[in-house]
Image (tube, rainbow, N blue to C red):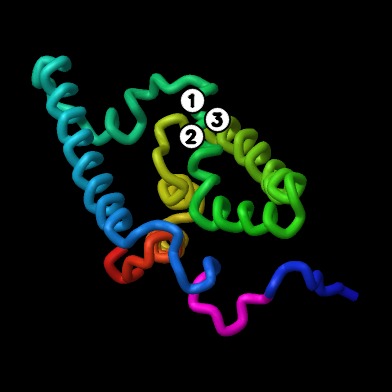
Amino acid sequence: MATFDSTIPPLTGQDSFFGGEPPLPESVGYAVVLGFGAVFSLFTTALVFLEKYFSGGAAITSEKFNTAGRTVKTGLTASVIVSQWTWAATLLQSSNVAWQYGVSGPFWYASGATIQVLLFGVLAISLKKVAPSAHTVCEIVKARWGFTAHITFLIFCFLANIIVTSMLLLGGAATVAALTGMDYRLA
């Protein structure tokens, strides 16, 4: 049976974890949302122009864009897997278990998913051997099981992307709203 720790006050009736008063002013929320949005947009635009300039104006095909010209090595691939695995729910939940269980909480939280990441690496290597020109799991499903399975997987993958994108946007908006008091619909 679980016991209740009476030293941590419950959040019942509170609008915010911070007792109704956000630690940062609302103007910081707008500065972060608009400032980072503008900076990242300009940075991305500059990178596109720089690549076009240094590549001699060569056309970039979708093959090169999606696979980085198939020149990505193992270390970068591993870091991409970990960075894609670490999304809003992971960051927010690991902070939550750190609050509840101390320093060991995030370690044990991450340990549960380590096996999945390792198995995915092994699966990716074997898939690359049998389907070296495949880009997505849907292409592999179409080649192996046909058109009907391909459409089914397309629908499921599209819905999964919508759910993940919604979760990332809502998690980020809730965090900015909790820290600055900014309306979550604008964050």
**Residue 78 numbered tag:** 3
- Residue closer to the observer: 167 or 124: 167
- Residue closer to the observer: 186 or 44: 186
Inter-mark Cα distance, 3 to 2: 5 Å
Residue 49 x, y percent position in the rendering: 13, 27
Q: Residues within 10 Å of mark 3 (few under 14, many from 20)?
A: some
Q: Are marks 3 and 1 in contact (CB under 8 Å)?
A: yes
Quadrant of the image containing the C terminus:
bottom left
Tell me the residue at 40%/32% (across/down). Answer: 133
Residue 99 x, y percent position in the rendering: 68, 56
At label 2, the amino acid type is Val
Tell me the residue at 32%/70% (across/down). Answer: 183
Residue highlighted by disc 2? 80
Residue highlighted by disc 1? 76
At label 3, the amino acid type is Ala
Residue 37 lies in the magenta-colored region: no
Quadrant of the image containing the N terminus:
bottom right
Above or below, 133 against 164 in this view is above
Q: Is residue 89 left or right of residue 60?
A: right
Q: Are marks 3 and 2 in contact (CB under 8 Å)?
A: yes
Quarter location, residue 24: bottom left
Is residue 168 among what the camera can see?
no
- Residue closer to the observer: 172 or 9: 9
Q: Are marks 1 and 2 in contact (CB under 8 Å)?
A: yes
Above or below, 176 against 105 in this view is below
Q: Which residues are magenta?
A: 10-16
Which element carries disc 1, helix, strand or loop?
helix
Tell me the residue at 86%/73% (across/down). Answer: 3
Tell me the residue at 61%/57% (across/down). Answer: 93
Which element carries disc 3, helix, strand or loop?
helix
